[in-house]
Image: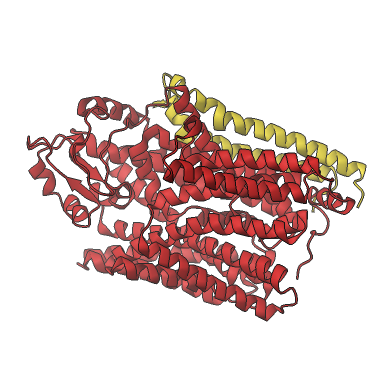
Chain colours: A red, B yellow
Amino acid sequence: MNGRFIDNLPKVYGLYTGGFLVFIGLMAILEQLGTPADTLGVLFVAFTIAIYATIGWLSRTMETGAYYVAGREVPSLYNGMATAADWMSGASFVAMAGGVYFGGYGYLAFIVGWTGGYVLVNSLMAPYLRKFGCYTVPDFIGTRYGGNTARLLAVIVLVVASFTYVTAQINATGTIAARALQIPFEVGVWFGLLGILLCSMLGGMRAVTWTQVAQYIVLIIAYLVPVFWMSNAQDFGLIPQLSYGAAVDRITELEALHGVGTMVPSETFPGLRALTTAHSMAPDSVLASWKFITLVLVLMCGTASLPHILMRYFTTPSVREARRSVVWSLFFIFLLYFTAPALATFTKLQIMDPNLATGIIGKSIADVQSLEWIQKWSSVGFLAISDSNGDGLLQINEFFMRGDIVVLATPEIAGLPYVISGLVAAGGMAAAMSTADGLLLAIANALSHDLYYKIIDPEADTRTRLIVARVLLVIIGAGGALVASLQLSSILGAVAWAFSFACSGLFFPLVLGVWWKRANRQGAIAGMAVGFIVGFWYLYHVRFAGGTPFLGLDHLRFGIVGMAASLIAMVGVSLATEEPDAETQAMVDAIRIPSGKTILDES
Amino acid sequence: MKPSSAHTEHWERTRRLTFITLGIWFFFSFFIHWFGAEMNNLSFMGFPLGFYMAAQGSPVAFVILLFWSTRKQEAIDEECGVAE
């Protein structure tokens, strides 16, 4: 190929996508030739990780611009794909459909929140931060408001929010690696970390960008192919996302038949749940509606405050491209998120409908236990069946499973070939790795650029800065893997907290930094410190100290309390102290127009 | 740098567009979901409407909204002579 890599992107990623499809075909042939399923799983995961590692190696760099912001040359379409991979975590890929399966309508708040947040990113943040020309999010806070205190507070919020999130991602890579490669979980975690570091260590943001594009392609193929295949094989419709309305209605009938919500399970299995929530029943009280929209709000503001997402928009060549890449990001995320409820609905129908061959509820327990997928997933503790009432039939409150099964076992429930299960494992791995990469880089970059270079040693040369950045990346990665290997928290619980931490501390200092000239240093410091501390205190109060949630704001929604405190503190303190000097006000004017030089020089 | 009149006009129009965008965003994010139970009595493409709006309608609206507002913003940047 002639010319630079950046000029050949459609060709490179076109070939890559074609090559991946050929690889899937090859695996299908191997399966027909009698290759054992385990070998296919190993091949899928090993092959894709090898590709990512190769991209990471080819993108190695010793320039700060390339390491921190990928040389600011990523076109919007590709940045959109990279952001989508950065954004969609192992939890989105593996657990979201399961969340809709168990939570029904109420869980859809995650889908509304995690898409609508990009409207805030586009309208309030991304183009202005790009014009600023910063390397990291604390870089913006530190320069806009001035002073090391503001910068340091931004670093602290960033580290707490991102670290909460990254342990869940390393945990997910460990789970998938352990299952696909047949190794113990504790080894899988470190293996996953090794893959993550191979993608990011040598080339920083440049390497992470180009591996994330590759990972997006794998994860979206892996998510959509099984759903389309299953829908067409079971006659649910050509385009499943548009045709599951009838299935939603049918489930409402079946819920009455099987007693969903009235039949309460009498036994418990750790980590497993029985279905007790109606699928499409809307919040029907003021408190329930309030809980729905407060969750939506926290997720949206968290999205717009998470540094590993915002820093992706620093990599585009211009403000216009930054804005466009937010639009592409939302579009590529939307493709997965509007599929997840369809998948959850069809899986539920297949399990519950006695007229379908796959239906198990209401069948005899002996028959169900002889099914291959039931045996396979119960042997690894993802599923349990217990004849609580001893009638020999399987009732809805006698069937327990993990939410992850909805994505992981769908190919098997619908009787698709094993090659599809291997593909799903590769997709889950891609989703978890790409998010972990982005998060680790966000933390390490903030510590190396903002803490080490800007605060501790402003004289450091480029070489030292980049070595410090890499050492920090390895240390933080190892810390994350260590916490993950202890298995302290469930995947989704920790992920939701990260959003509340981020929006408590950073949302208003970022937004008002652009939209309110009067916002000053004292106000920003108060906003970050008060928001973060109040948020932390409230989380402790409702989650660990046994306090009663105020207005139904539980531990998933503590960001609402943190943000309110942050806003009041920031506005109050700003107004009570002097307005920012003329230079700062001119800086705010300059970031509001796309043309002209960036505020910070490239160095 | 002193803000020129073109810059002032640009920011006025940018701000107006942002308010309109956030108004539509508010409608699809919060307003309609407050009435989920009422909407569920209506049917759309075979779905209960409330369920549909949360699972698909609002995300579709956000995608269209962003395509629209980004085009508008680029037009404003061009017309005020501050595009890159």
In this picture, residue A202 sits left or right of residue A263: right
Residue sitting nearer the eye, A540 or A213: A540
Q: Above or below — where is A154 with respect to B21?
A: below
Residue sitting nearer the eye, A309 or A516: A516
Q: Position of residue A99 (x, y in %)?
A: 37, 42
Identified at 26% across, 58% down, the residue is: A418
Residue A316 visible, this angle: no
Q: Above or below — where is A498 with respect to A565?
A: below
In this picture, residue B38 sits left or right of residue A261: right
Q: Position of residue A21 (x, y in %)?
A: 40, 62
Q: Quadrant of residue A457?
A: bottom right
Q: Quadrant of the N terminus of chain A?
A: bottom right
Identified at 14% across, 37% down, the residue is: A394
Identified at 67% across, 64% down, the residue is: A73
Residue A185 visible, this angle: yes
In this picture, residue A522 sits left or right of residue A369: right
Identified at 73% across, 44% down, the residue is: A512
Q: Position of residue B75 (x, y in %)?
A: 77, 42
Q: Quadrant of residue A156?
A: bottom right
Q: Quadrant of the C terminus of chain A?
A: bottom right
